[in-house]
Amino acid sequence: MPDKVYMMPNPPTPNVPIHFNPTFCTGCNVCVEVCRTDVLMPNPVKKQPPIVLYPDECWYCGICVEDCSIPGSIWMVHPLNQSVVVNWKRKDTGEFFRLGMKNPPPPNTKPPAK
Amino acid sequence: MSSWWNFVQRQASVPEWAYPIRYDVENQVDIDVLVLGGGIAGCHAAINAARQGAKVAIVDKGSIRRSGQGGAGVDHWQAACTNPCSKVTPEEYTRAIVDSFAGYDCGPMRYIQCQESWDTLLDCEKMGVQIRDVRDEFKGAAFRDEATKLLFTYDYENRHTLRVYGHDMKPRLWREIRKLGVQIFDRVMATSLLTQDGRQGTHVVGATGFNVRTGEFYIFKSKATILAMAHPRREWTFSTELNGGSASFADLNIVGDGHAMGWNAGAEFAAMERSMGSSGGFAYIQYGVGYPDNTWYGCTMVDANGKEVRWLSHNGEELKSIAERFQPAPDQKFILMGGGLVGGAIAREVKGNYIDNTLTELIRKGEIKLPLYADLPGLPEHERRAIFGLMVGNEGKTRIPVYDIYTKAGFDPDKDLLQAPVMPPDSYRSPHYPAGSMVPQWREVFGGGLLVDWDLKANLEGLYAGGRMVYGAGEHAGAATSGRYAGRQAAKYALSAHASELDTKQVAQEKARVYAHLNKGRASIGWKELNAGLCRVMQDYCGAFRNEETLQAGLRILNSVKESELTETYAANPHELERVLECHTILTVGEMIMHASLARKASSRFLNFYRLDYPEVDPPEWNKLLPIRLEENQVKVRELPLDYHLREPYAPSYEENYQAHSGL
Ligand code: SF4
Ligand code: SF4
């Protein structure tokens, strides 16, 4: 069943830079506090993930993700206008991959240099 | 589930503003040193002023823990000329960079950086920032010093620029600030400087601001004030609809508020006529596409069929090995940095190696076929890991946006070639491909800022500056060192100065200006439309080509907007109020740029400044600064030699001036 239909303005783009998983997110709002432009607002419902209010003001810095201590609670998705052309080619096989493709290759788990 | 749209759909109601609304609350704060802007420069300024024993407050539109351009990290640390491995002196480095900008650069700020960059980095290390390869991952690499475990970049021989693990630089500075008892005012937008008797051109005695979440008003009373608020942006282009704020190196908060409030107070600015090209909102993910410059300096590039693009030395000779990309040529003492210097042409003697500069022609002839790829797997392991893992991973906006997201999506630097953007052939003339294709009328302010003396003090008593607020180019270590120095100077001044009374009329007028937009109904325009309208004026009347008539017309139109649309723009909450007031800044900075452009009656390659009515490029008699300021609201222009900082009343050498002023 589709949701009830309201009169809503068009969403600004990029639509949703930041996503939350309510199963893990505790609603602690650390991400809200570190976001420089108040893209994220506390949820009026306590312990629920923040609300993405100003997606069009996101700098895509990833700090909200980096500073969240609960894995899997929050992730960032680049604007399609940029990510659509993030392509790579496997050097020895010539296979093509794209950020956001349907069946991506398995993740590379090597962490950044420490 | 998490967007506003989803929330409204689920709850069938609009959430109330998340913070208490307190437009009627007024706070007064009395301190010795007020730091406006809590980025890298502001944090180092606050720390060093507090260490001198001054009572300090720091103000930022975001939260200082992570705000500012350096808030998302840093991967390299420039001009560390006094580090134990450096073979370049502060004098040599300063001269090289100032010459590269043909003298249009702030000599004192550069020299201070060269003297204090390494000490500042050691200070950051004490705060917990990792600056060495402590786990020996790069043992044996050509860019590592085995004794100190320091890692270098660009010039492995002369070792003046380090690679650092600075992804958490900002939280470390923030902790230090709190430890020192600095009063932190997060989410406060500073809106104006307060001056003695409320008059332009006098002593700076404080500032005003308001909280961008609650709307409450702040009056700061200070003995010394440091402007540390970055450079103007959103001046010629504004388009969040494409990519939000992603396409810009500066986040949306960065508009040049410090420039506008300094100007209104009567401070003097230099090089505001200078600009650089921009691709509007169409840039690519920073550090997230293949390219051979900056953080990716030294990377091998191949074409669609795997054909390698040549690397050349400063004199156009082909380099035979990858190792040579990180070495000066036999006739060079050192190289300044890799690839291009943003907005400048590096002097030959210190120009780095670069990817074939005939690439554009090779693409046209079909000898090189697009798309190009960055061949990370073709690099030696240490080089590959230094680019993708050390630098991409610690540089601003790379840890999550590039390293984490790409590797989770299966990108493997050991196996994969990362594609470069596909652009018109001309766009490959600059090796900085992520910037995208430039359009002449889309520009960005570059290097225009406050004119300072050897104390990093402005023409107004009690006013100091650091970072990109200062005239001349800068980057992370430049912001850190100038902030540090300005913090010391401001504290020294404040500790012996008397507090002045604030002018109540000036405060009341400013308060009225700040809140005026709350009384407009939503029937008028919002901040985005206003911003985009102001950008159109700049594009058309003050773009890549300007003349007397377009500039005068531009000023006329800006003034007309000031009287009509600007006063009518609505703000429905404190956040929108912040954005509308930023449009005031954008308009004021636009006027500054037009006045500075009118003053320069010649074209200049170095300033990227072209007058249709004065086409002669860089005639020698125009190689000078033309500082501008307001006096009783009239624009005053004067002439100043480019090397003013080495002439009377100053000493003739960098070293002597530094010794006399640094206070160390
Ligand atoms: S995403 Fe993380 S930081 Fe943000 S509210 Fe949820 S748990 Fe807290
Ligand atoms: S990515 Fe950066 S700007 Fe965007 S919501 Fe997260 S912290 Fe804010």
Image (tube, helix red, strand yellow):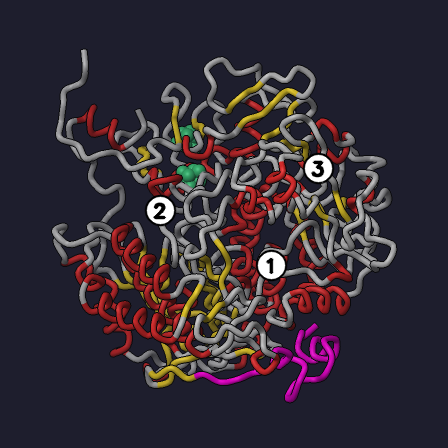
Among the two numbered marks 1 and 2 on one chain, the one whose residue lies closer to the N terminus: 2
**Which residue ends up furthest to the bottom in the rendered image?**
B648
Q: Nearer the viewer's eye, disc 1 or disc 2?
A: 2
Q: Residue at position x 59%, y 78% from top?
A: B619
Between B626 and B403, the one nearer to me in the picture:
B626
Q: Do the residues labelled 1 and 3 touch (CB within 8 Å)?
A: no
Determine which of the numbered discs, if any, sits on residue B309 in the image: 3
Residue B452 visible (yes or no): yes
The span picked out in magenta is B637-664
Is any part of residue B206 visible from this angle?
no
Instruction: Give how far apart the Cα atoms at labels 1 and 2 are.
Output: 30 Å
Camera-nearest residue between A100 and B179: A100
Q: What residue type is labelled 2?
A: Ser
Give the amino acid type for the residue marked by disc 3 in the picture: Val
Report the residue marked by disc 2: B239
Can you say whether B308 is above or below B221 in the image? Answer: above
